[in-house]
Image (cartoon, grey):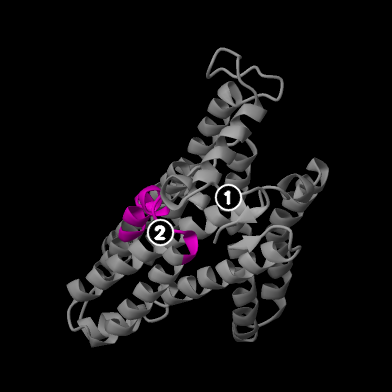
């Protein structure tokens, strides 16, 4: 139990949980670089290797659904220790596998652990920083500038590559491009990862950040994790690697349509600071939602109904 009066307690929790998430991500994403080796070792096709990703996505989906029941009985720190141990044991058993279904079964368990661990860490971090969230919020114009600057970098990179390709040979460009591609991949991952954290921040602002809501977000993300690898593998087997780009464009189009629909729905019923919520005929306000979310946060973190009295103000249980 960490006391909020210690000024660095939030940074300690953030560092520990972020390290756990980083190591879990490294352990899971190692499947990408070793994919060709697995194909040769198991005599499998790209479509068959995609089933491993689908199994991991299914486990991620199930782990996200377990978030609410697990956090109502165990503390977040205990959950993270358990899932980290499970990932360690399963990854250690992968080299001894001789069949595709064995690897898929292990990655089903790895996905289960990662889904539960990611949702637990993200929810706990948001709870730990709930008092400092208003002070950390940036101005709207600053956010607009940063977003525009981030996406304009892609356009500038494409335009600058055109004259370079005209004056230099392909060999002299491809080798330096590998190092640049590695940095670009890291930057793109950082940018995309902000989407999930921004959604959690919005839910926390309106008091909607509950274990059920966080689990639902992880579950829907896992559905995409399950389906995309299988679709990509089938497209490669039938039409070659050139079919990946149309598939990705179609998936991004579906995501854009869903995002537009979600924004329209949110604008109709999202709680207003003046109390004009469409959910209850205008009787609630943003403060009511915040109080409701804080009550569930204290109940789950403190476990008042199962482990004694509720935690006092200024205490974060990890």
Q: Nearer the viewer, residue 227 or 102?
A: 102
User: The residue tagged with tag 2: helix, strand or loop?
Assistant: helix
Residue 90 vertical position relative to residue 200 in the rendered view, above or below:
below
**In which quarter of the view is residue 181 placed?**
bottom right
Crowd rating for badge 2 (residues with CA inside 10 Å; few <14, some 14–19, many 20+): many
Q: Which residue is at 68% across, 60% downward?
A: 154
Q: Which residue is at 38% across, 49% downward?
A: 219
Q: Determine if the magenta segment contains residue 148.
A: no
User: The residue tagged with tag 1: helix, strand or loop?
Assistant: loop
Query: Which residue in the protein does label 2 denote?
Result: 116
The image position of residue 53, as x and y in percent, is 33, 65
The quarter in which the C terminus is drawn is bottom right
Q: Which residue is at 48% across, 46% downward?
A: 304
State the CA–CA distance, disc 1 to disc 2. Answer: 24 Å
The image position of residue 288, as x and y in percent, is 62, 27
Can the viewer see residue 231 in this picture? no
Q: Which mark is residue 256?
A: none
Query: Which residue in the protein does label 1 denote?
Result: 311
The image position of residue 306, as x and y in percent, is 41, 49
Left or right of 275, for residue 139 = right
Q: Give the range drawn in magenta.
A: 59-77
């Amino acid at each position: 139990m960490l006391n909020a009066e210690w000024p660095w307690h939030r940074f300690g929790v953030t560092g520990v949980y972020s390290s756990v998430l980083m190591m879990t991500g490294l352990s899971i994403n190692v499947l990408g670089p070793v994919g060709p080796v697995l194909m040769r070792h198991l005599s499998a096709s790209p479509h068959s290797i995609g089933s491993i990703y689908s199994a991991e996505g299914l486990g991620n989906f199930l782990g996200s659904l377990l978030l609410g029941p697990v956090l109502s009985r165990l503390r977040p720190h205990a959950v993270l220790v358990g899932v980290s141990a499970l990932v360690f044991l399963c990854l250690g058993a992968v080299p001894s596998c001789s069949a595709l279904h064995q690897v898929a079964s292990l990655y089903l368990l790895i996905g289960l652990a990662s889904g539960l661990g990611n949702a637990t860490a993200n929810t706990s971090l948001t709870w730990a920083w709930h008092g400092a969230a208003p002070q950390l919020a940036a101005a709207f114009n600053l956010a607009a500038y940063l977003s525009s600057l981030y996406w304009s970098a892609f356009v500038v990179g494409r335009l600058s590559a055109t004259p370079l390709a005209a004056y230099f040979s392909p060999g002299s460009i491809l080798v330096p491009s590998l190092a640049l591609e590695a940095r670009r991949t890291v930057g793109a991952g950082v940018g995309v990862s902000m989407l999930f954290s921004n959604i959690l921040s919005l839910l926390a602002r309106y008091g909607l950040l509950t274990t059920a809501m966080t689990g639902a977000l992880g579950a829907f993300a896992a559905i995409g994790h399950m389906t995309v690898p299988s679709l990509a593998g089938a497209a490669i087997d039938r039409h070659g690697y050139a079919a990946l780009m149309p598939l990705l464009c179609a998936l991004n189009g579906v995501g854009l349509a869903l995002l537009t629909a979600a924004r329209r729905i949110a604008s109709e019923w999202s709680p207003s600071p003046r109390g004009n919520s469409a959910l209850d005929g205008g009787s609630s306000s943003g403060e009511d939602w915040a109080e409701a979310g804080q009550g569930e946060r204290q109940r789950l973190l403190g476990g008042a109904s199962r482990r004694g009295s509720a935690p006092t103000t200024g205490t974060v249980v990890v």
